[in-house]
Amino acid sequence: MRTIRAIAAILCGLCTVAASAPASAQSWPAAKPITIVVPVPPGPTVDMIARLIAGKLQESLGQTVIVDNRGGANGTIGSSLVAHAPPDGYTLLAATPASHVTAVHLMKNLPFDPVKDFTPIMAAVEPVTALVVNADLPVNSVQELIAYAKANPGKLSYGSSGIGSVFHLTGELFDRTASVSTVHIPYRGVSQPMQDVAGGQIQLLHISLASARGALASGKAKVLAILEPKRYAKMPNVPSITEILPAFRKPSTWFGFFGPAKLPPDILARLSAEMRKAITEPETRAKLEAQDLTVIANTPQEFAALQKEGIEQFGAIIKAAGIQPQ
């Protein structure tokens, strides 16, 4: 009888452990819909990528996937929501370097730790970026632009979507690397500065190629260089800026996905595999590349390393530019 009671106690204990086991070991994702929080309003690239991934996950996981736009405060409102969500695989974040890289250096009271409070899942894509100038500017190469800037100090201006934005910092990196001084003009968003380059109100932009396509096609702007380490296959005659300025290394401007910290390993592995499969399908890859987006689709470990590298690189640019956190 003592043996029977002992066995019964063990079985009871096993049942208790099973009942208290995390959802990852039992029913994920069957319990409820998955929510992907997008910390910007509908429309931008990160929102488009989130909706693409949501549709693919819904097909592969057999569970409803909801996209929830929570814009505001440079992406920190939606990001904070995910940082404080249970790590059960049902609340995910579509993010950009604005909230998870540069915010480390630009915000005094960040309501979360971009590294410690999240689990990296995958950096999905990165936009191809370019140095674009007004068509009437009397330069046709980066070398000529640098010479013009040195001969006309303070007369060239460039726009960005705001102080501390990735393209503001790219401009600071260009100035430092080329030993020139251009004037930064902050805007809200990227459409207006692109219009102003086309109209001649400002002279240059460091911008995603997709955002510049209209002005380039109309002949009101011209591209001098691709800001990536290598030439862009679709524009083989346009040099990479590193061919002219080898020290120029623009940090990655990825769009990626996170979960809350301590996401269970089996859920992380499943999400990573499904997202990578979704983004690398030939039809999906072709659609993304048609929008001048480079597919990254890296592993959680590679994404963590990419985020850390960006924090260090952008931090060095911000410090050199003397930009103070707000």
Image (tube, rainbow, N blue to C red):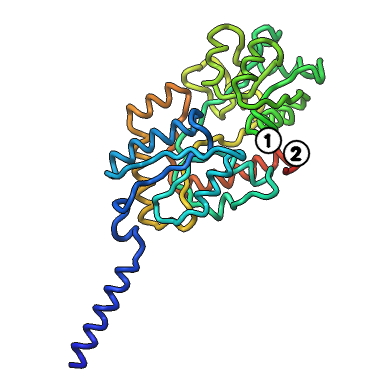
Secondary element at image label 2: loop
Q: Dot 2, crowdedness within 10 Å: few (<14), some or many (≥20)? A: some
Q: Is residue 192 above or below residue 269?
A: above
- Relative placement, left or right, of 165 versus 178 is left
259 horizontally vs 103: left or right: left
* Alpha carbon distance from label 1 to label 2: 8 Å
Q: Quadrant of residue 65?
A: top left
- If you read the primary sequence from the N terminus, does the residue marked by circle 1 or circle 2 appear first? 1
**Callout 1 crowding tier (Cα within 10 Å): few <14, some 14–19, many ≥20:** many
Q: What residue would you read off at disc 1?
A: 164
Which quadrant of the figure contains the C terminus?
Answer: top right
Tell me the quarter of the picture where residue 124 sits.
Answer: top left
- Seen at 29% across and 52% down, the residue is 30
Q: Residue 26 placed where, x, y %?
A: 29, 60
Please state which amino acid type lies under the numbered disc 1: Gly
| Residue at disc 1, secondary structure | loop
Q: Estimate the x, y position of residue 7 in percent, counting from the top left.
A: 22, 84
